[in-house]
Image (tube, coloured by chain):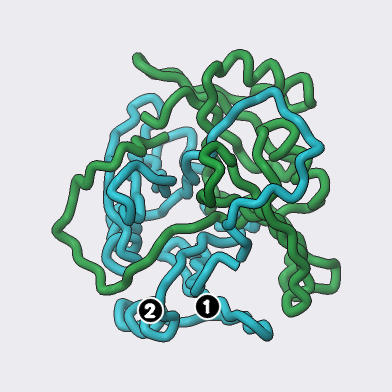
Chain colours: A green, B cyan
């Protein structure tokens, strides 16, 4: 977990590259099952779906859709069996977790459990608490009250 | 790559859980080296840094900082050698890639190469092109012109 309040705490480093962080792409084993998890359980909205012949893959774009405008997206990547990108799947440590803010952790955990995604891990500090479930691919999903 | 234009293409699924996708956490081998890559090479701003005694870890929060307001964040997670979270590091396939929009791909690639991060892979379609470099942990970073 991290603060998302915008307050630059180190400004001594300059980059000539101007970038905008626009989405994170995760690889999924079963596209339909993953779309169902991120929409039905986590309440995201499916905003895009494309076939990419060049990679022999399918992508689905999801957003929280809170603002009604374009937001940071989660991209689900699925590759055909004969795609060169269809390497053996292990979740790995590159992706530590995806974090979702909720208003009521206990209620969110209850709903997730009902859909087949029980609480697997929890971290408690003096002032906060983060709960974790896993998506259908085994990716850690953090449910937290705020971003701090 | 995915469209980030907000247009819900499937709205038949209802969720009772109201969430907001607020950040993606990646695990890093060397916190300083990763902060340097995401700030100096990719131009992100360091907005948060915390020690979490409960996990024996350190986290750093980064944002593009384009809007001057709180945005979706990238969290770098580093764990001490004796942390229970310090499992053997392999990038894996869970995280497919992190995507950054740039105005000029060739110029961005030139700058990245100068910093020691050369072009490793490229996908070209009839209408678009995506270039990939790797971060200091071996995580794929996509540089793209737009979100479509």
Viewer-closest of A72 and B73 = A72
Residue A85: quarter of image: bottom right
Mark positioned earlier in the residue sequence (2 or 1): 2
Compared to residue A1, the image places residue A17 above or below, namely below
Label 2 secondary element: helix
State the count of labels: 2
For the residue labelled by badge 1, is the local secondary structure a helix, a strand or a loop?
Answer: strand
Foreground pick, B140 / B123: B123
Labelled pair 2, 1 in contact (Cβ < 8 Å): yes
Chain holding disc 1 = B
The spot of residue A25 in percent (x, y) is 60, 57
**Location of residue B124 in the rendering, given as x and y in whole percent from the top left corner:** 63, 83
Q: Residue at x 51, y 30 (%)?
A: A101
Residue at (43, 65) in percent of width and height: B135
Q: CA distance from mark 2 to mark 1?
A: 10 Å
Q: Can you see residue A13?
A: yes
Q: Quadrant of the C terminus of chain A?
A: top left
């Amino acid at each position: 977990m991290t603060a998302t309040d915008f307050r630059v705490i180190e400004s001594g480093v300059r980059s000539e590259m101007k970038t905008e962080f626009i989405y994170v792409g995760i690889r999924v084993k079963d596209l339909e099952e993953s779309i169902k998890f991120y929409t039905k359980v986590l309440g995201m909205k499916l905003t895009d779906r494309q076939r990419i012949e060049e990679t022999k893959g399918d992508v689905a774009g999801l957003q929280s859709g809170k603002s009604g405008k374009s937001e940071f997206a989660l991209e689900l990547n699925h590759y055909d069996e004969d795609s060169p990108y269809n390497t053996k799947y292990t979740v790995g440590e590159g992706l530590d977790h995806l974090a979702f803010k909720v208003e009521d952790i206990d209620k969110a955990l209850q709903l997730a459990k009902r859909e087949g995604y029980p609480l697997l891990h929890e971290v408690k500090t003096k002032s906060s608490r983060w709960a974790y479930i896993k998506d259908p691919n085994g990716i850690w999903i953090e449910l937290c009250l705020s971003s701090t």
